[in-house]
Image: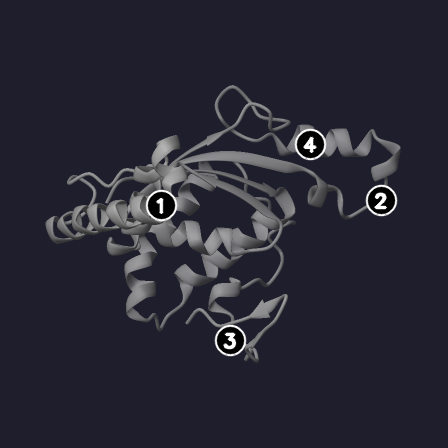
Amino acid sequence: MKKIELKLLKHTPFVEEDNTFNFARAIDYKENVAIWDGKKDYFQHLNVSMYFKNMPLFLKILLNNEKSVIMNEKNNFDLSKENISDIEYQLFEKWREIFFDEIKQIDAEFSINGNIDALAKQNAAYMVSVFAPTDIIYTSSLSHLNKNIVALQQLLKKEEKNELEKKLSPYVHDLLGCFEQAKLINKELSNVNHEFLLFAKEEKREHFNATYVTKYL
């Protein structure tokens, strides 16, 4: 298991040289701008952008599935033998070649522009573990980020975990450590009850049209 690394991007406001977020400066700014006087939605408008290295694919899916976030993934994420098992690497290489030939026959434009290999790799990546590491840029409001942090904390505290949640727990613990080290956790913003949409217990009726609703699990 590779440790997750978090770096706050420079364009994020109130970031210190030690890669931490300064909530005191953010609150001071809020109190000195008349438009935010008495408003509770200030941190809904204050975005933080983060670069994550070695983010497990499944945690990426969990976060990206939430509303009001922007995420970009490194196109050719690291699927070397050091990061995945031998059988996963063999399956990845096998299907990368299959997809490469199929895409080349179907879409000549990809062949001309040199995008065929990247697309083949993206499709072949479904053959590897959901815990394979990837690198992403993730942007969220501080308010929504802290809601997701609450969901991560609740997932970790859950007493009766299924097999997926048990395997996910060490990565969740690691990710929470990154948020804590970057000083992104705020008690006031974390005083909510939030559950990941992917794990939501409420029943949803599936329907398909111009918009659609379907179940993941």
Q: Nearer the viewer, mark 4 or mark 3?
A: 3
* Lower position in the chain sequence, tag 4 or tag 3: 4
Measured Cα–Cα span from mark 4 to mark 3: 35 Å
Measured Cα–Cα span from mark 2 to mark 3: 35 Å
Q: Nearer the viewer, mark 1 or mark 3?
A: 3
* Lower position in the chain sequence, tag 2 or tag 3: 2
Q: Which quarter of the picture shows residue 206?
A: bottom right
Question: At which x and y percent is residue 194?
Answer: 57, 62
Mark 1 residue type = Asp
Q: Report the residue marked by disc 4.
A: 26
* Lower position in the chain sequence, tag 1 or tag 4: 4
Q: Is there CB contact under 8 Å for labels 1 and 4?
A: no
Q: Report the residue marked by disc 2.
A: 38
- Label 3, secondary structure: give it: loop
* Lower position in the chain sequence, tag 2 or tag 1: 2
Q: Is residue 135 left or right of residue 34?
A: left
